[in-house]
């Protein structure tokens, strides 16, 4: 197991290296540079802009810029944001609590609702329960999250007055204030994920429940509960956990749409705004974060397979 | 009937008659007294990009920093320049020397008393970094007379426009401590902890993409004269202002309806009727009118040909454009003047050349220009819904005249870069406030947005020179008319109509002076009725 983990960790290095290189090149290939956005409305001559571009090094060939940038990144120096005028790491870390709060709570809700629903649908396949579940999940998957977001605000905030409409409050403002402002964004973000996970759980469970050992277990008189949760679910978990991992990695990357609608200062919003402003350091630092998070989440999910299914070994 | 009413019947009668007569009694009999304290929560449509108001005309600087900083002058209710930090202002008869006597005992937020050295350093910095700073190109030298008087000596006559340029809140010449001005001579470099002004509020906290918090400055020294929009005696009732950054219109409106925000900015006029029908909300039409205008590449490409520009000017139909942009008619107006309807310079000179959607005339100009169906790009910021609708309508109008017009949507950074690019730019559009003719000078002197594309005309330059010298309003009015005539004749820009902004407040926000209807957010005299 440890050998497997170490080899996977070592494989991160070329993956991260290639990914950040691609990000760097594509970022530099975008038209414009941070100087344009910084200069803004000033009546500055083209010569002055060229002077600043030269001073900041954006006029040099991409390859040369890359060779200067690479040692810094390898030593953990993500540089400073041209717009926030702070180290990139600090800017990203300031946004992490928002994105992590959303991601973790959304995942918990998704798993708590989706897996039991999916199991119920599978166990009652082709009954009204199953058909209802499929119909509802079809609708949820189809509804765009931005539309849901506005709908929830109008319904729960404006009409019912149950919840605040937008914004983020840190935990230091009090738990109630913190959680109240996350409920609607989490719901908006989770519905499509719940629908997806229900469908995956349902189809994995149906496949497993048709296996001979399950039929044998029933014949042996094992309780329905044991058959479903001790035997079938554990075997179906590989597919389910894969999707859970994907959802979590996506959530940790931040949702630009949800963050924009609910005015949440998360990582999705940060990187999207940085892209528009050509804030290279933030784009590169943000993408590095997404890549590392995705790799670690996938590793964690892969390792977890062996806990749920002893037949899976990493020797 | 018993002539003597017993006391019980008298009481009942008084309960009926007092409300009945309430309508004919003076309104201020029932007016409430302002209440001190409270936090004003504002849903703001855009966040600060940096902390340097001197270097930009962008929003939300006037909304936020207009409460933190003051200048030598500011806008009065009629959008003329009135003294703010200046106690008195004098000019020599030849207009080459301007003396500013400063108010004494005015403190910066760091406790330092404002003096002539701070004003000088601030002017010098604004001259270099400010988009409007070019009006000081003839400034020769400064002269301090003691701690509280600064004189500016000019090579040529400088008219009263100097005061408006200093006080215009689009790019105000705000006064900061000398130490800050000299430490950060480059644009956008002022850090958050050095945002130090003399205004009634000070910056306490800014969490990017979350909020901007201001707190009342307890040692603020107000003027003694009557309140006058951005100047005069600023009476500050509110203890704290929090600007919450909420980019989505729908979310801002929802926040106002739930009571999370007391006031929200930049709301589309399409919401006017619905919000007016909600009991405790008050939409406020906010002026003066903002000119929807089109600017050209005057140096290269097809639009550098004056007949092509004249064809475009003829083909444009502002009535259609306003119809496409606003849904509530009171928020848009077609006005054949380059000055808004509220400006004293509003006039009809050159009206014969004002755009009326005359396709035949447009075609004649195109023929004269030997236009050969070259593509003309109309570039617009993709996230600016108003400007996108404007140019989409314009493109159709130009196509009717036989112009090969294409709308190109760009993100803001690319749009800003491309509008300076002589090889790329053809046309871009924007909105602007030009209350006074001299305010046009920085953007029509050949340098804006760059020397590669900017409008330059020697006759116009002469008018600007005259405007900057002239002190008589009547003579300036004549020059303003001449400027307008030249602008239409040379097609410096195309006037596509005027629109008004809307802010919405709840009925707890009291604004007895009506400042919220007057332009950028000015909270003097505003109080919260809790």
Image: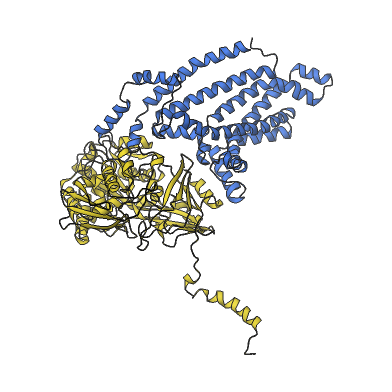
Chain colours: A blue, B yellow
Q: Position of residue B60 (x, y in %)?
A: 40, 46
Task: Give the number of marks.
Answer: 0
Q: Residue at x 60, y 76 (%)?
A: B15
Taking the image as shown, residue B56 lies to the left or right of residue A180, namely left
Residue farthest front in this picture: B146
Quadrant showing the N terminus of chain B: bottom right
**Considering depth in this image, is B29 or A140 the residue closer to the camera?**
B29
Q: Position of residue B133 (x, y in %)?
A: 26, 45
Q: Height in image: A283 above or below B261? A: above
Residue farthest top in this picture: A315
**Considering depth in this image, is A228 or B400 the residue closer to the camera?**
A228
Taking the image as shown, residue B449 lies to the left or right of residue A171, namely left
Q: Height in image: B325 above or below A142? A: below
Q: Quadrant of residue A224?
A: top right
Taking the image as shown, residue B366 lies to the left or right of residue B59, namely left
- For the question of whether residue B311 can be seen, the reply is no
- For the question of whether residue A128 can be seen, the reply is yes
Q: Position of residue B336 (x, y in %)?
A: 28, 55
Q: Position of residue B119 (x, y in %)?
A: 29, 48
Q: Quadrant of residue B225?
A: bottom left
**Considering depth in this image, is B333 or B431 the residue closer to the camera?**
B431
Quadrant showing the C terminus of chain B: bottom right
Q: Height in image: B184 above or below A73? A: below
Q: Residue at x 54, y 35 (%)?
A: A98
């Amino acid at each position: 197991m440890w050998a497997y983990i170490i080899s996977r960790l070592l494989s991160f290095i070329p993956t991260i290296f290639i990914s950040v290189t691609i990000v760097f090149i594509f970022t530099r290939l975008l038209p414009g540079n941070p100087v344009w956005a910084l200069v803004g409305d000033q009546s500055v001559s083209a010569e002055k802009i060229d002077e600043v571009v030269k001073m900041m090094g954006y006029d040099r060939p991409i390859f040369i810029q890359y060779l200067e940038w690479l040692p810094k990144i390898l030593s953990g120096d993500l540089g400073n944001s041209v717009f926030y005028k702070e180290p990139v790491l600090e800017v990203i870390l300031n946004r992490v609590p928002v994105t992590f709060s959303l991601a973790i709570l959304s995942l918990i809700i998704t798993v708590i609702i989706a897996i039991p629903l999916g199991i119920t649908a599978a166990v009652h396949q082709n009954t009204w329960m199953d058909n209802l579940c499929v119909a509802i999940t079809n609708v949820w998957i189809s509804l765009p999250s931005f539309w849901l977001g506005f709908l929830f605000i109008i319904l729960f905030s404006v009409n019912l007055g149950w919840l605040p409409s937008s914004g983020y409050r840190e935990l230091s403002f009090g738990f109630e204030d913190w959680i109240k402002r996350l409920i609607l964004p989490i719901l908006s973000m989770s519905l499509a994920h719940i629908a997806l996970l229900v469908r995956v759980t349902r189809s994995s469970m149906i496949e497993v429940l048709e296996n001979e050992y399950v039929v044998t277990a029933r014949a042996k008189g094992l309780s329905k509960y044991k058959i479903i949760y001790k035997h079938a679910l554990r075997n179906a978990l590989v597919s389910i956990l894969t999707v859970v991992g994907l959802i979590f990695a996506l959530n940790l990357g931040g949702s630009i749409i949800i963050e924009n609608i609910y005015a949440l200062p998360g990582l999705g919003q940060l990187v999207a705004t940085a892209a528009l402003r050509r804030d290279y350091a933030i784009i590169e630092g943000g993408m590095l974060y997404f890549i590392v998070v995705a790799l670690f989440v996938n590793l964690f999910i892969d390792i977890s397979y062996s806990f749920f299914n002893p037949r899976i070994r990493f020797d | 009937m018993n002539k003597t009413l017993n006391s019980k019947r008298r009481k009942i009668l008084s309960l009926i008659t007092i409300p009945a007569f309430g309508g004919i009694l003076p309104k201020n009999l029932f007016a409430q007294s302002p209440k001190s304290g409270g936090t004003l929560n504002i849903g703001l449509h855009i966040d600060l990009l940096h902390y340097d108001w001197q270097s930009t005309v962008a929003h939300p600087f006037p909304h936020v920093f207009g409460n933190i900083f003051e200048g030598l002058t500011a806008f009065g209710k009629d959008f003329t320049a009135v003294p703010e930090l200046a106690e008195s202002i004098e000019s020599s008869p030849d207009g080459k020397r301007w003396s500013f006597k400063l108010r004494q005992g005015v403190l910066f937020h760091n406790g330092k008393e404002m003096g002539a050295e701070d004003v000088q350093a601030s002017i010098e910095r604004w001259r270099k970094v400010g988009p409007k700073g070019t009006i000081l190109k003839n400034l020769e030298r400064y002269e301090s007379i003691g701690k509280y008087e600064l004189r500016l000596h000019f090579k040529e006559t400088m008219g009263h426009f100097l005061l408006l340029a200093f006080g215009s809140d689009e790019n105000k010449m705000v006064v900061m401590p000398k130490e800050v001005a000299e430490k950060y001579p480059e644009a956008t470099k002022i850090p958050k902890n050095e945002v130090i002004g003399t205004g009634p509020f000070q910056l306490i906290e800014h969490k990017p993409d979350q909020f901007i918090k201001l707190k009342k400055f307890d040692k603020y020294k107000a003027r003694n004269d009557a309140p006058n929009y951005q100047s005069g005696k600023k009476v500050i009732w509110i203890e704290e202002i929090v600007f919450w950054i909420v980019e989505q219109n729908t979310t801002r409106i929802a926040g106002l309806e739930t009571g999370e925000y007391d006031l929200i900015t930049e709301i589309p006029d399409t919401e006017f009727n619905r919000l007016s029908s909600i009991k405790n909300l008050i939409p406020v039409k906010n002026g003066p009118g903002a000119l929807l205008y089109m600017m050209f590449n005057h140096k290269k490409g097809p639009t550098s040909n004056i007949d092509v520009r004249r064809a475009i000017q003829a083909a444009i139909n502002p009535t259609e454009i306003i119809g496409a942009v606003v849904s509530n008619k009171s928020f848009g107006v077609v006005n054949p003047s380059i000055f808004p309807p509220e400006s004293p310079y509003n006039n009809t000179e050159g009206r014969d050349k004002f755009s009326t959607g005359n396709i035949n005339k447009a075609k004649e100009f195109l023929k004269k220009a030997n236009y050969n169906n070259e593509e003309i790009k109309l570039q617009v910021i993709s996230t600016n819904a108003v400007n996108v609708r404007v140019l989409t309508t314009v493109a159709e109008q130009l196509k009717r005249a036989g112009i090969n017009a294409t709308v190109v949507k760009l993100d803001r950074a690319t749009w800003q870069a491309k509008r300076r690019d002589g090889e790329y730019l053809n046309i871009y559009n924007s909105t602007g406030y030009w209350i006074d003719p001299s305010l046009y000078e920085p953007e029509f002197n050949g340098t804006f947005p760059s020397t590669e594309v900017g409008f330059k005309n020697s006759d116009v330059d002469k008018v600007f020179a005259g405007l900057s010298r002239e002190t008589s309003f009547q003579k300036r009015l004549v020059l303003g008319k001449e400027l307008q005539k030249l602008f239409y004749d040379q097609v410096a820009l195309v006037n596509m109509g005027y629109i008004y902004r809307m802010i919405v407040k709840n009925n707890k926000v009291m604004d007895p002076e009506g400042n919220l209807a007057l332009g950028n957010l000015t909270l003097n005299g505003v109080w919260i009725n809790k």
